[in-house]
Image: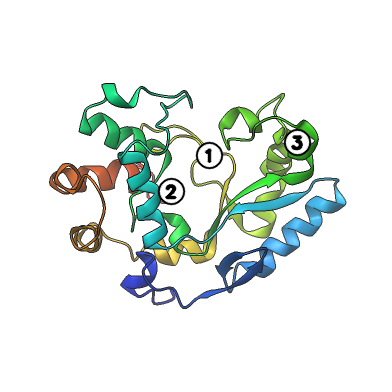
Amino acid sequence: MEQIPEQAWLGQKNDFLVDAGNGHKLHRDVVAPFLAMQEAAQKDGLDLQLVSSFRDFNRQTVIFNRKWTGQAPLLDIHGDALAFNSLSENDKLHAILTWSALPGGSRHHWGTDMDVYDKTAVQKWGGKFDLVESEYTLGGPCHALSCWLNETMDQFGFFRPFSINTGGVAPEPWHLSFKSIARDFENTRNVNGLINALGKSDIEGKTCILPQLPALYNRYVLNNTNQHRLV
């Protein structure tokens, strides 16, 4: 097991990152397997590209705060918009965490995880691409890619950490994780480190979050009983 500093799994300082092209960064041991998988997809007529890769603690804080303050939409488990002004603080919190991780609790902090799509298929499709589950099911522009990943991704060491709804994070068929490296981060992260980091952060809703953070950690960071799932 590789030693993972606390700042690395929290997304505050990650020395494992290298350039993955087009403004993306990945863990140094993940780039080659991803490029190999991308090449295999291309040979099968699929344009496998990154939508999102590494995000640091500060970027995740911005994402969370925009949703908390109503500057970005909040969605229910089905991907439908919620009426922001009708939600309590607790309702807002759970709506956010269904789709976006707490800063420090995101798998995207590690460089092992990425969101992917079929860029060419989406461009030909021409609709508004929102990165929702229906775009990866029958009739969606990324359905063929999703089926290909079902059959192929494990050959390159990848898996989907959010494949089903367990009552925590919504299903994310676009989210891939490189298993062998992600396991080291999974085995290092802990609730006390997250509590400390969020307590010192500029996250909105802190008085709502911190008192229930152990339960939130179990539900949305560990994604309930599956210990291999973080957003």
Q: Foreground residue, 83 or 188?
A: 83
Horizontal and vertical percent for residue 219? 30, 40
Above or below: residue 143 compared with residue 64: above
Q: Are marks 2 and 1 in contact (CB under 8 Å)?
A: yes
- Kindly state the secondary structure of the residue where label 1 is placed: loop
Label total for image: 3
Q: Amino acid at mark 3?
A: Ala
As shown in the figure, which amino acid type bears the numbered disc 2? Val
Residue 78 against residue 99 in the figure, above or below: above
Which image quadrant: the N terminus? bottom left
Find residue 106 and report its image quarter.
bottom left
Q: CA distance from mark 2 to mark 1?
A: 9 Å
Q: Position of residue 154 (x, y in %)?
A: 64, 52
Label 3 CA crowd tier, 10 Å (few <14, some 14–19, many 20+): some
Q: How busy is the neighbourhood of tag 1: few (under 14 within 10 Å), some, or many (20 plus)?
A: many
Q: Which residue is mark 3?
A: 144
User: Which amino acid type is shown beneath numbered disc 1?
Assistant: Glu
Q: Is residue 125 left or right of residue 228?
A: right
Where is residue 173 drawn, in percent x and y? Answer: 58, 39
Q: Quadrant of residue 157?
A: bottom right
43, 120: nearer the viewer:
120
Residue 222 seen in this snapshot = no
Which residue is disc 2 drawn over?
A: 231
Q: Position of residue 221 (x, y in %)?
A: 34, 48
- Residue drawn at the location 14% of the way across and 46% of the way down: 207
Nearer-N-terminus badge (2/1): 1
Q: Which residue is mark 1?
A: 172
Q: Is residue 140 left or right of residue 29?
A: right
What colour scheme does the image use?
rainbow
Residues under labels 3 and 1: Cα distance? 16 Å
Label located before the other in sequence (3 or 2): 3
